[in-house]
Image (cartoon, helix red, strand yellow):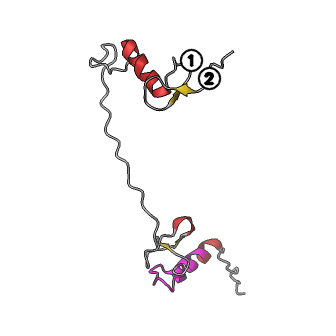
Amino acid sequence: MVNETEALPCEGGCGLYGTRVNNNLCSLCYKKSVLQHSPALRFEPETEQSQCCPPTNSPAVEEEPVKKRRCGICKRKVGMLGFKCRCGHMFCGSHRYPEEHSCPFDYKQSGRLALATQLPLIRADKLQRF
């Protein structure tokens, strides 16, 4: 008994191998022959739109370009390991410190405000004079 999936030279003459299941044709030649013999399998887009559903005019979706993460000083790609400073910029490992990139953020004032909000104000009661 001959195996149905045995590889035989394609009868289409393309140089590939076909099988008995596909009439001794390779997959490419078999697809061409099926499309030639049955036009119902061909894809033809419809030109008329359906009457039941009105066409929807959706606005074109614009893709935002991907912004590459780079150091604010040396423009080196930082990828996932970039350091975001309080001034709002991204920096590499060598420029991450405020002294290295001349950071305009006022750390002293920020610290004072944090202490003022976190620590309660303690006042002693007034002493009454007799």
Residue nearest the observer in this picture, 129 or 117: 117
How far apart are the two marked residues, 2 and 1, measured between alpha carbons?
7 Å
- Which residue is the site of mark 2? 5
Return the x and y of residue 23 as percentages of the image width and height.
51, 17
Which residue is rendered at x = 31% and y = 20% of the image? Answer: 54
Of residues 125 and 97, the one drawn nearer to the viewer in this rendering: 97
When the figure is inspected, residue 88 is found, relative to residue 64, above or below; the finding is below
Q: Helix, strand or loop at disc 2?
A: loop
Q: In the shown orientation, is residue 43 left or right of residue 22?
A: left
Along the line of sight, the residue nearer the viewer: 38 or 50: 38
Picture disc at residue 21: 1
Q: x and y percent of residue 45 in the render?
A: 32, 21
Give the residues drawn in magenta, as a range. Answer: 96-114
- Residue 121 coordinates in the image, percent (x, y): 64, 76
User: Which image quarter holds the N terminus?
Assistant: top right
Q: Amino acid at mark 1?
A: Val
